[in-house]
Amino acid sequence: MDLSAVREVSHAVSAAHLFTYLVPEGAQEAAEFGVTDRGPAYLAFRSAALGAVPWQVTLAAFYNFSPRAVRAMDGVWDAAPPERWQAARFVAVGRAMRRVGVRMTADRLAEARSLLDPVVAGADYAGRVLAAANASVALPSDPLVALWQQITVVREWRGDAHLVVLADNGVGPCDCLVLHTAAGGLPTALARTTRRWNDEEWAAATARLAARGWLNSGAPVPSSSVPGATDTAAALADATLTDAGRASRERIEAETDEYCAALWAPIGETGARRLAALIAPITEAFTAAGTFRAVRPA
């Protein structure tokens, strides 16, 4: 299978899934459970499919979050059990899609499902923890939200596979986040705030990547300018990728594509590219609504 088709459909799936973490409807639904901090709400919504697991299990599955960030979810299952968080996630997704005017005809929805469903049904879930958990969730009655949940399964499948590749390449949890921000994948301040790696940890990860020849280290900046940083150290910010770093990052993505080729085999290259086109209206509607500005600044 042409790996460019794997990359194309993977990008489309990731983009169509992403909005759930950025829309106000999620915060509103979490507030109904008395959870008003975005961090624990994010962790509860995304890990609800796993069941009432301790925070350490969520930490292992999510990989690039610091222990202190994930420990903050302690108590979310007391606020509401996982099945209610999952149901609230579906409500938030449906409300957000209606608000921004996602428009997909019944025929388009049916065709997208005809491509996605055999992929989900035929996937090998060994070692794919978040994908397997999401595949076990009963689909909601709303056709658009059900499509989104199937998208979520394959999005998490690639994410699970990517963690295997990162580990194989010796790129640890904080290191992969530093690499991602250096490549422009996420604003550094947002990454630091949400994943809560402190100054020493961020600087150590930056130094490890620089020692591999992957980064040109940025100048030290006071920790007070980095949200969530400690008061006693400096964090290396604005590091940039070297040519070797860019090549290594692309190699890691290509290895992830290779893992994912088997996932998309049931529909082949043509089906994968067709699915990417079919689900594009989801991303287009949220882009037009300005949903992604926080993570994709102009």
Image (cartoon, helix red, strand yellow):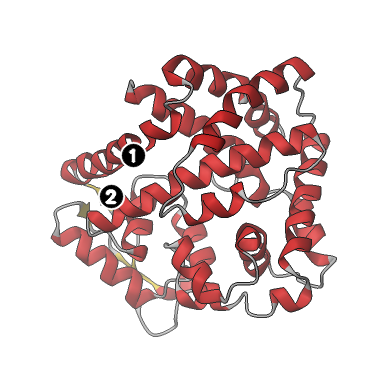
Q: Is residue 235 left or right of residue 27?
A: left
Image side of residue 225 versus residue 237, left or right: right
The residue tagged with tag 2: helix, strand or loop? strand
Q: In which quadrant of the rendered image does the N terminus lie?
A: top left
Give the mark nearest the N terminus, 1 or 2.
2
User: Which residue does the numbered mark 1 point to in the structure image?
Assistant: 259
Q: Provide the secondary structure element on which disc 1 rests.
A: helix
- Compared to 158, does 168 lie above or below? below
Can the viewer see residue 298? no
Residue at x 65% of width, y 26% of height: 113
Q: Position of residue 150 (x, y in %)?
A: 63, 38
Q: Residue at x 61, y 64 (%)?
A: 43
Viewer-nearest residue: 67 or 201: 67
Say above or below: 80 vs 215: below
Q: Position of residue 69 (x, y in %)?
A: 53, 73
**Which residue, given by chain and number where applicable, does mark 2 sit on?**
240
